[in-house]
Image: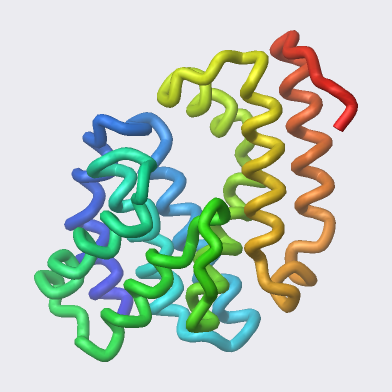
Amino acid sequence: MEALIQKITEMVKPVYTFSAFYSHTIWPHALRVSGYAKDLAAKIKANQFIAEAGGLLHDFGAAMYGQNDHHITGVKEAVPVLLKCGCPLKFIGPIITTIYSHRGSQKIAFRTQEARCVAAADAQDHFTDLEELWEVQKRDLGIMEEWIHQALSKKLERDWEKISPEIKILLDGTFEKAKRELLRIAHMNGTPVGNK
């Protein structure tokens, strides 16, 4: 399956790298999420290939069309990639499921353990790379600095809520650390932070 992951990686890298949306950050994010998802899948005895491929493709729609409905556009665009790479049909549905349900802002139920892993891996990367997220909010999304703290606080909350209980145990302390880091970044940027 490593050869198939390599084929998928080679096909999607140019789309991520030359994206008109988030071009500075989206490819490294996809790679990290893929690795985190594979690690989480190993820990909860889920299919590592499905989780890893789902991690690579989870933001494919965002790379192509922007963040709006990227869980839907990602599904549409990932299927041809998987078919072209020779992915066995039995894996395509579960991979697509991981893409469709990964977003913390959507209330889409998980249908597989691998989908839980990809959503948690996406959140884990958000928790551990907040400076990059801050810059994305400012540079790529055009959000005013005074609103970034509030927007990211809500994002982190949604991400944490989306993570299933068995995986939250594996990420113990990560959410609290992320909230403290977000406050530090806000203060460093001179952003006023209310008592929330």
> Residue 46: horizontal and vertical position, in percent?
53, 85
Toward the viewer: 73 or 3?
Answer: 73
Query: Farthest left residue?
Result: 84
Task: Identify whether 20 is placed above or below 178.
Answer: above
Q: How is the image coloured?
A: rainbow
Horizontal arrangement in the rendering, residue 158 relative to residue 48 (left or right): right
Find residue 89 and report its image quarter: bottom left
The residue located at (61%, 14%) in the rendering is: 145
> Residue 188: horizontal and vertical position, in percent?
75, 15
Toward the viewer: 86 or 98?
Answer: 98
Query: Farthest front residue?
Result: 107
The residue located at (80%, 28%) in the rendering is: 183
Tell me the quadrant of the picture where the C terminus can be found: top right
Find residue 27 and report its image quarter: top left
The residue located at (49%, 28%) in the rendering is: 136
> Residue 13: horizontal and vertical position, in percent?
25, 49
Query: Farthest right residue?
Result: 195
Task: Identify whether 85 is placed above or below 16.
Answer: below
The residue located at (30%, 52%) in the rendering is: 60
Tell me the quadrant of the picture where the N terminus can be found: bottom left
Find residue 151 and report its image quarter: top right
Task: Identify whether 20 is placed above or below 120.
Answer: above
Horizontal arrangement in the rendering, residue 25 relative to residue 82 (left or right): right
Say how many tags the image has.
0
Query: Farthest top residue?
Result: 190
Horizontal arrangement in the rendering, residue 189 relative to residue 69 (left or right): right
> Residue 81: horizontal and vertical position, in percent?
16, 65
